[in-house]
Amino acid sequence: MSRVYRTREGTVSAVDTRTQLSTLGSETAPGPLLVPQGKTKLVRIIAAQCFNMAAATGYSALIRLEGPGLPEGPESFALGAGGAGVATGGNGVNHAIAIDVDIPVTAANEILIFGEMCGTDVGSSEFVVTCVFE
Amino acid sequence: MSRTFTVEGDIASADTRTLLTTQGSVTAPSAVVPSGMTKIDKIVVAASTEGLANGAQSYFLRLGGAAIKNGEQVIAISAVGRIAPQAGSDAAPQLMPAVVLNNLDIEVSASDTVTVAVEGAGDDTGTGHAVVTIFYS
């Protein structure tokens, strides 16, 4: 069975705060991320995040999946961690990571994707998350 | 058997779907899916920024066109961050090795055209550049 790729992104600007990723770049209102018809499993998460290094501190990042599209309940995934010793002169690039999973989903129901910055407030962090359905 | 198709290009603006249509010295590579190919099995992709402006930005790939049987597929690539160095200092480069995504299983129709676009979201951290290789099988 072929796979289908659905993505959302967003900026997380508050620490320890569940922040929904609801946009897709030029699509500011792409609507709910619905499990595609005929798909029964979430088989992979592809995700990346990076922070703006605006504060001299550290953090970790995780993503949460929730909503009626997940009949077994919410799931969460570690995505990365980082920090900066000074608030001047930091930069970095994080490539996406692929996490293979086997999570049942309910077609035509919504999955909500959240990003979260944990630990201390490093400024803001940009998240992009792809759900791969099969 | 597999076949490859590579395109690259500048990503000049944030929140803008930007088509990648060139391949370095080849300015107009054919985007037609080769005969006999039925799916995209693998992608090798990198996207980063020159980092001339502060902020955090993510990049994602849009695969579309008549060749993609189930409609546009959107895939996360990377995220970048940057804060200005203090006066008199130079910033470090923004480097991203390509990431390889295997076992993608995206259905395509041979002889139709695929469109490859990359988009940056969040802050505009300066001009980005992206390169994408599609492996058909």
Image: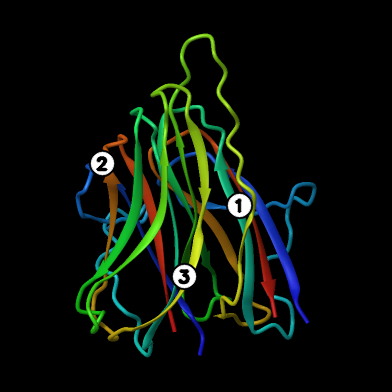
Inspect this view and state whether residue B70 appears: yes
Q: Is residue A43 left or right of residue A124?
A: right
Q: Residue at x 44, y 84 (%)?
A: A134
Instruction: Give B76 or A87, whichever is nearer the viewer.
Output: A87
Q: Name the disc covering residue A127, or none.
A: none
Q: Give the Cα separation between the discs numbered 2 and 1.
A: 26 Å
Q: In this picture, is A71 found above or below B98?
A: below
Q: Mark 2 highlights which residue?
A: A13
Instruction: Name the residue that disc number 1 marks.
Output: B46
Residue B123 image-quadrant placement: top left
Between discs 1 and 3, the one toward the N terminus? 1
Where is residue A34 shown, x and y percent of the image? 29, 76
Q: Where does residue A71 sit, x and y in percent of width and height?
A: 23, 84
How far apart, in angstroms, are the residues tagged by discs 3 and 2?
29 Å
Which residue: 62% across, 76% down? Answer: B40
Residue B8 in the image: above or below residue A56: below
Q: Which scheme is used to colour this image of the protein?
A: rainbow
Q: Are marks 3 and 2 on the same chain?
A: no
Q: Chain of mark 1?
A: B
Report the side of B65 relative to A54 (left or right). right
Who's the residue at 27% across and 37% down the image? A121
